[in-house]
Amino acid sequence: MITPSPSAATSAIPSRWSIFPGILKDSLTVFWGDWLDLRVRVTQVVASGLVSPLIYILAFGLGLGSALDSAMQPPAGDNYLEFILPGMVALSSMTISFGGTTFSICGERLYSKTFEEILLLPVHPLSLFLGKMMAGVLRGLMTSGSVIAIALITTGNWRFLSPLFLLVLILNCAVFSGLGVIIGLNVKSLEGVGLLNNFLIVPMSFLGATFFDPATLPIVLKAVVYLLPLTYTSISLRSAVYLPLAQFPWYSIPVLLLAAIVLSVVGAYQFSHQKD
Amino acid sequence: MLKIEGLVKRYGTRSVLKGLSLQILEGEIYGLLGPNGAGKTTTINILSNLLQADAGTIAINGYPVSERTKPWLGIAPQENLVYRSLSCGENLDFFGRLYGLSGTDRRRRVQYCLDAVGLADRRSTPAERLSGGMRRRLSMAIALMHNPKLIVLDEPTTGLDIEARYELWELIRTLQRQGMTVLLTTHLLDEAERLCDRIGILKEGAILKEGTLTELRTCIAAKEILTIQTADEAAAIARAESLGLPHRRYGSDLAFWLPEQWELKEIIDRFEGIPLDAVARQPVRLEHIYIELTQQLNA
């Protein structure tokens, strides 16, 4: 049963822990591990994130939209359905990036306990955070990819696949999966996740400029709406698809990037102090 | 290999570790025994840098425990920490990557670990399809993947059937033969007795007694333990006292400490007149020492 042992992997104190390429490599490995776990549930992930956007597309885009289209012209897109489609992409990417990541970490922490094994590894906390965040980005892209496919079919507008659109989408996934990692590290039970989902994600789904143009809001409400990261994603995705490049809200990219960086710092700190 | 000195850990006002000190020599199997709540898992969590001690030091190979000593340490926790949807090979490969093993080394190491724990034929089987014993072995293989100097096994055979237990014991012995140092926590006394070179008995956050089994046996002034079943226990105890034999209760069993080996006939002669239903002699076991020490503390 036993064969001679290969040479020791580590015989001296390692130094790779503090090296930046090591952080990147380890992040990719953590991501790869999550992908191996995720690959058997791809259909499930895609399907679970499609339900809400499809309902919203049917109810708001086709139902309410048909009445609105006869009364007004949307600020972007030819009709209300087209107007909300980029918002639906933002919404689905947010929901799954956040929810999938939070539930995954909660499951590892509270049920399978594999999270403890991860904490035992000589891996930089930032790598752990980034790896988990990247897995969340992948989850978000998988689900929003289906919504994009629906958008392509219904509008025939290939700008849903433009590099700018995809860049904003990835940043949005990064922000919400980053938030999901931090929440996942802190909640004490799955009920806590549900609570945060109800008080944070559900309100943001409706207030994050997914169904309306925030430019027309009263100033106080506008201030509230622009505190939400989803707002920047929705308006940017909409502009990327329907408006000329000159009208693209470029400030959205640094805002989302900054949010992702701040969350990464907080997340890495959380990982370094995580005691399960 | 491992030196723990004056380790203190409090949770609020409750002290879990009260100045725990122990030393484990290179290549030995050290058994840390103790009841639930004695502080075994807390010690392991501090050792693996998952918890901060309130006082005291832990050094591995002369270096204080930190992120950088993690590669020297392999830990197989109580739960089987395996990714259930990943195959055995993928689990090992994943952890090998995170321990920084490069391609060829990693592949060789995966094969070695699968061979070592007897799961080579299950390389492509998802962990969720393994039996409990196999999952425990996979968890141990993960702990071995980076070829640590010190492996910590936290109650490794709890919940396993006897065959799986024997297999794991054999694996632990093999690891020792290969030069690995093993810290084994268990509350199964026969496991510690069979495997450990030295044993530390932990109670309420401190080591009550430490040593080899032979050294620990000196805690009990007996060569053998005599257990009897009788309808008249009071008479048996009175007779034993007159013979100078201390008596103890091990569960519901009435037992006497024999200062030397007595033949069966001698026992029957000395308890003449007392209705003996059954008589059993056994050597002093770790359970007798453990109970004696822990009861002394309670007294």
Image: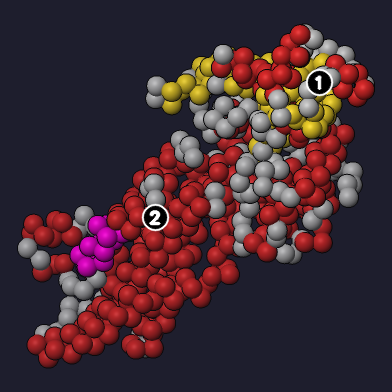
Q: Amino acid at mark 2?
A: Leu
Q: Amino acid at mark 1?
A: Gly
Q: Is residue A102 above or below residue B26?
A: below
At 24% from the left and 71% from the top, the residue drawn is: A210
What's the colour scheme? secondary structure
Residue A194 placement (x, y as % from top left): 33, 58
Residue A125 placement (x, y as % from top left): 51, 41
- Same chain for mark 1 and mark 2? The answer is no
Circle 1 chain: B
Please check the rendered image and state whether residue A208 is part of the magenta-colored stretch, yes or no.
yes
Q: Which residue does the numbered mark 1 point to in the structure image?
A: B273
Give the number of the mark in front: 1 or 2.
1
**Highlighted magenta segment, given as a residue range:** A197-209
Residue B38 placement (x, y as % from top left): 57, 26
Residue A190 is tagged as 2
At 76% from the left and 61% from the top, the residue drawn is: B123
Q: Is residue A134 above or below residue A247?
A: above
Could you say which is closer to the camera, residue B183 or residue B190?
B190
Give the image quarter of residue A150.
Answer: bottom left
Count neighbours of disc 2 (C-alpha within 10 A) and say few if under 14, some if 14 to 19, many if 20 or more. Answer: some
Circle 2 chain: A
Could you say which is closer to the camera, residue B235 or residue B170?
B235
Residue B76 is tagged as none
Q: Is residue B14 above or below residue B124?
A: above
Cα gap from disc 1 to disc 2, whole angstroms: 67 Å
